[in-house]
Image (cartoon, helix red, strand yellow):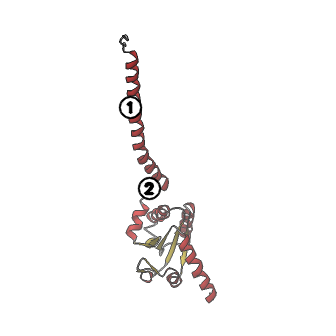
Amino acid sequence: MTVTRDQKEAFVVEFRERLDQAEAVYLTDFSGLNVKAMTILRRRLKEVGAEYLVVKNRLARRAIGETAGVQMADILVGPTGVVFGNGGVAEAARAVAEFAKEHDQKPVFKAGILGDAFLDPEKIAKIATLPPREALLSEVAGALSGPMSALASALEAKTRELAGLVEALRDEPRPEPK
């Protein structure tokens, strides 16, 4: 089946829109994966709000262009699959990394795009090791509540101390007025 020029242009426009909407985009080399494995990968990514799309490099180059000063033409060689991470930056990277551990280290991260920043495979691997979003939010909440608890305890202690002083003054014998 021949793909027309209009269909290619429509793909490039749609691809650009998806790039702009995604929280993170990861480019992978999926060589060595069969259809069954690709289906499993797509399901896992869907569970975390991400999507996997196999692209033609020529069309992807036109859609992506240059990111953070990096020519994507050097990266978009060989079989390329694109992960659109919409359910969290780390979740999509973690899903691919965990899948790769189970399938002879395939797919392999080629690069990533986070906002306007270019990510090399090492940075993506670090992102994949981040705890889930809920855990990070819990840590932040815990870090913020610690000082607040200390302040509340200090104020409570001072209030008790003041109450003790008032009670001591009340119980103290008063001199007779002259």
Q: Quadrant of residue 7?
A: bottom right
Question: Which numbered mark, 1 or 2, is in the foreground of this view?
Answer: 1
Q: Residue 123: percent from the left, percent from the top?
A: 39, 67
Side of 174 where 76 appears, left or right? right
The residue positioned farthest toward the front in the image shown: 178
**Residue 70 at least partly seen:** yes
Disc nearer the start of the sequence (1/2): 2
**Residue 2 at least partly seen:** no
At x 41% / y 79%, what residue is drawn?
A: 70
Q: Nearer the viewer, residue 133 or 174?
A: 174
Q: Residue 165: percent from the left, percent from the top?
A: 37, 23
The N terminus, quarter of image: bottom right
Instruction: Determine which of the numbered discs, if any, sits on residue 131 in the image.
Output: 2
At x 40% / y 35%, what residue is drawn?
A: 155
Q: Label 1 vs label 2: CA separation? A: 39 Å
At x 35% / y 12%, what residue is drawn?
A: 175
Q: Nearer the viewer, residue 20 or 122?
A: 20
Tell me which amino acid carries mark 2.
Answer: Pro
Q: Are marks 1 and 2 in contact (CB under 8 Å)?
A: no
Q: Residue 151: percent from the left, percent from the top?
A: 40, 39
Mark 2 closeness class: few <14, some 14–19, many ≥20 residues within 10 Å: few
- Image height of 139 relative to 24, above or below: above
Mark 1 closeness class: few <14, some 14–19, many ≥20 residues within 10 Å: few
Tell me the element at label 2.
loop
- Image height of 121 relative to 65, above or below: above
The C terminus, quarter of image: top left
Task: Report which residue position mark 1 lands on.
Answer: 158
Q: Nearer the viewer, residue 45 or 141?
A: 141
Tell me which amino acid carries mark 1.
Answer: Lys
